[in-house]
Amino acid sequence: MDTFNRDPGPASQSSTYTQHHRPYFTPYDVVRLSEKQRGKLSTSQEEKARQQACGFLESVGAKIGFPRKTIATAQNLYHRFHLFFPRKDFGYQDVTLAALYVSSKMHDTLKKPREILMASYSVRFPEQAAKSKSIVGEIDMDPVVLEQDRQRLLAVERLIVELICFNFTSRMPFPYVIKIGRELKASKRLTKFAWRLTIDSQRTLVALQYPPHVVALACIYLAALLSTFEQTETHAPHNNHEIVATLRDHGPWEVKFQAQVDDLEAISHALLDLLISQTQNPSASTTPNTPSSPSPHISRAALHIAAPAPHTSDQLMRLKIVMRETEHPPRNRTPTLGDGFHDFPDGADAIGRNEGTVRFLFGPNGGA
C-alpha cells in the first residue's frame, strides 16, 4: 500500500471531519493501538525497533547539536506516530528524521531538512564521513537520492503535524525534576540520577500516557528506590529512604503534586523493563550526553556515550518483584477510543488525505 496516497475508505464518505488533539492516552489505548500497528512483529521485535529508532534519534540529534528537549520531543513524536501508522509502511529513518524536523520547529531550534539529512548520513555511513574532506564531515551524496529522502521526510512531516493537530506546544518533564527534587529536599546526586532516568523515560511510551510532572516525580521515586534497594543506611543517604517511604503509599503528597501512587508504580515498572533490557544488552545506547547548544564539531565517539549500569539485571528484577508484592491497584481511566468498536478516535483516519475538510482542534474530546 502506498502510505502517502492511502485508500480513501470510509473517510471519503463525509466532506468534513473533526480531529481532536489528545495529549495523553490510557494504557489500554496504547496497548490496543500498538497491537494494530505492530503487524506481524512480536512485542519484543517491536520494542527492539523502537529502541533502534530512539538510538538513531539520539545520534543524529547529538551530531547536529540539538538540546535535550528537541531530541526528547522527537522521540515522543515517533512513538505517537506509530500508534496510528503501521511500522511496515515506513522506514524508521524517515519517521525519526521527520519527527526531529517537527520537534526542531516546536522548540525554535530549527534546521533545514537538508541539514538533518546530511547529519543522518554521517551517522548511517561513518566510514564515508571519516573520509569526507568537508570540515563538518558532510558526505557527498547523490543529489537525486538526497531529494528523494527530502520528499519522504516532508511527506511524513505532514502526517505528524496533522496527527498533533498543528499543536506545537510541548511540555517536558525535565524542569519538574529540578523543582520537585528541591521540594522533596533530594540531594544533587539523586536529582542527577532522576534526570538521567527522565531522559530514558522518553524511550518508552510513558510520555504518551502521563503528564510530564508525573513522569518527573516517578523518576525521582525510582531513583530513590534504586539508591536504597538492598543498601544499608550507611550506604544510602537517609533522605532517599524518606522519599521512598513518602511516595510508596497514598498521602497528602498526591494532592500537592497532582499525582497518584499507582501511576508512579506503572511508570517505574516501564523504566525498570527498559533498564533490564539495557543491562542485558550493554551495546545499546542510553542516556547519552547531549550538548545544550548546536556545535558542528562533535566526535563520533561522543554519539554513543552510555551511562555505566550501577545495577545488574538480577537486582533490577528483584526490585520489580518486591514492587509487585506491594503495588496498588491501577486507577480507572476511561479509554480514549471508547467502546472498542473504532480503530481511530474522531477523524484520525482522515490524516494525510486530500479529500474533504478536516477541523483540527487543540483540545481533546474527552480525557484520558
Image: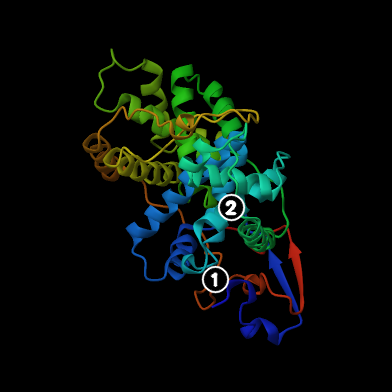
Give the mark nearest the N terminus, 2 or 1. 2
Given residues 261 and 340, the one toward you in this image is 340
Q: Is residue 39 above or below residue 364?
A: below
Residue 188 position, x and y percent, is: 48, 17
Given residues 347 and 339, the one toward you in this image is 347
- Quadrant of residue 361 in the image? bottom right
Q: Is residue 352 left or right of residue 38?
A: right
Tag 2 residue: 77
> Which quadrant of the figure contains the C terminus?
bottom right
Q: Is residue 284 visible?
A: yes
Residue 292 position, x and y percent, is: 62, 28
Given residues 47 and 189, the one toward you in this image is 47
Q: Secondary structure at mark 2?
A: helix
User: How many neighbours does mark 1 have within 10 angstroms: few (below 14), some (14-19), or many (20 or more)?
Assistant: few
Labelled disc at residue 349: none
Q: How is the image coloured?
A: rainbow
Q: Residue at x 70, y 43 (%)?
A: 111
Residue 294 position, x and y percent, is: 65, 31
Hey, what amino acid is under mark 1? Gly
Hey, what amino acid is under mark 2? Leu
Q: Is residue 21 above or below residue 52?
A: below
Tag 1 residue: 338
Q: Residue at x 43, y 44 (%)?
A: 267
